[in-house]
Amino acid sequence: MGRALAVDWGTKRFGVAISDPGRLIAQPLLTLSRRARHRAPVAAVIDLIRQYDVAEVVVGLPLTPGGEEGEAAAEARAFGAAIARRSGLGVVMWDERLSTALARRAARRAGVADRRSRARLDQMAAVAILQHYLDAQRARG
């Protein structure tokens, strides 16, 4: 079956989460950064795919609260398409509207301050995206 890897797409940072080999549990992996006006870290994601023997990639799709796609969603789709082209894997675009809110709530419960832990929040958002995706796949059977 292979692991699933999720990326919480962002303009400055990309949180990354990975599943266990059985695709039951998502866990934080790392945070990738990019400088202003630089390309998204596609090569770094490809390296992670190879390193962890990933079979499927999930990219968070930043929709508006009303469910529409804007500029950020178009950029996330382009990022997902680049990963699919370079890796040869299927890339699933997954609604990420609640992932950051869930990550912030979990961080507050754990006593983690938002300002000092933005990279960790990005990872937690990727975990929320991936876990939601894994749960939905299991529910479908």
Image (spheres, grey):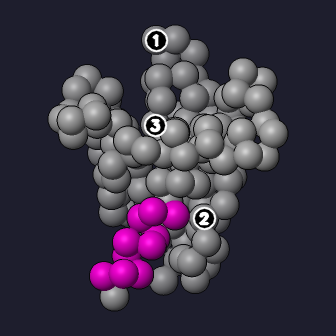
Give the magenta part as a residue range. 131-140
**The quarter of the displayed image where residue 51 is located:** bottom right
Residue 34 in percent (x, y) is at: 57, 23
| 48 or 28: nearer the viewer | 28
Secondary element under disc 3, as helix, strand or loop, is loop
Secondary element under disc 1, as helix, strand or loop, is loop
Left or right of 14, for residue 11: left
The residue lying furthest to the right in this view is: 111
Q: Residue placed at 77% from the left, 29% from the top?
A: 113
Let me know if residue 74 is in the magenta part: no
Secondary element under disc 2, as helix, strand or loop, is strand
Q: Which residue is mark 3?
A: 9
**The quarter of the displayed image where residue 13 is located:** top right
Q: Residue placed at 21% from the left, 40% from the top?
A: 67
Q: Quadrant of the C terminus?
A: bottom left
Whether residue 43 is visible here, answered yes or no, is no
| 139 or 80: nearer the viewer | 139
Magenta: main secondary structure = helix
Q: Which residue is mark 1?
A: 37
Residue 98, placed above or below residue 71: below
